Amino acid sequence: MLDVSVRVQSIRHFSVSQMALLIENAHLLLAGSAQHRSNMCEVLLAAAWICGEYCEHLCNVQGVLEAMLKAKISVMPGHILSVYMQNIAKLYAVLLTRAEEENDWDGIDSLDNLLLSKLPEFVLADHLEAQERVSS
């Protein structure tokens, strides 16, 4: 899905909307055995990257950001958490820019508080790269 989304511009809007649904329903993908979770988590890597890279196609950037921040840190592999962190930053930047252009200072405070309340959970991840991305 990642390769197709990057190469075929005409399907990006559809691809982004479907990947947003995957992220918003990640809890369903992460249920079950460790082997099942391992395979399904790879889909979340692509979904997070696509949503972050092509966020202009997202209908609800805030909703996707909140869903990514609710990730089950304890069951997700570190390399996927790292991609989540990278793309959480992209979505945050887009929302922050929009709020700033609209002089929505309350919105900016709300975004900041959301991130500050959820990011400490990512610091507790077992994967060193995920911890590093959160803390820097």
Image (cartoon, rainbow, N blue to C red):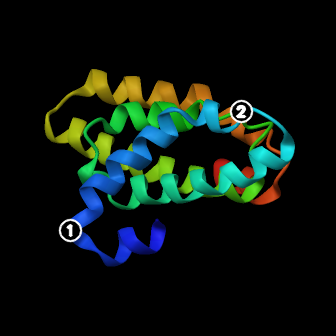
Query: Residue type at mark 2?
Result: Glu
Query: Toward the viewer: 101 or 124?
Result: 124
**In the depicted structure, whether residue 128 falls above or below residue 61:** below
Quarter of the image for the C terminus: give it.
Answer: bottom right
Query: Toward the viewer: 52 or 116?
Result: 52
User: The residue tagged with tag 1: helix, strand or loop?
Assistant: helix
Answer left or right for 32 relative to 22: right
Q: Is residue 31 visible?
A: yes
Marks 2 and 1, how far apart at CA: 37 Å
Furthest residue toward left: 102
> Residue at point 20% right, 68% down?
10
Query: Toward the viewer: 105 or 45?
Result: 45
- Spot occupied by residue 62 in the image (x, y as percentages of width and height): 36, 33
- Spot occupied by residue 63 in the image (x, y as percentages of width and height): 39, 31
> Residue at point 76% right, 54% down?
78
Q: Nearer the viewer, mark 2 or mark 1?
A: 1
User: The residue tagged with tag 2: helix, strand or loop?
Assistant: helix
Question: Which residue matches tag 2?
Answer: 121
Answer left or right for 48 relative to 99: right
- Spot occupied by residue 1 in the image (x, y as percentages of width and height): 46, 65
- Spot occupied by residue 112 in the image (x, y as percentages of width and height): 45, 31
Among the two numbered marks 2 and 1 on one chain, the one whose residue lies closer to the N terminus: 1
> Tags 2 and 1 in contact by the CB under 8 Å rule?
no
Question: Which residue matches tag 1?
Answer: 10
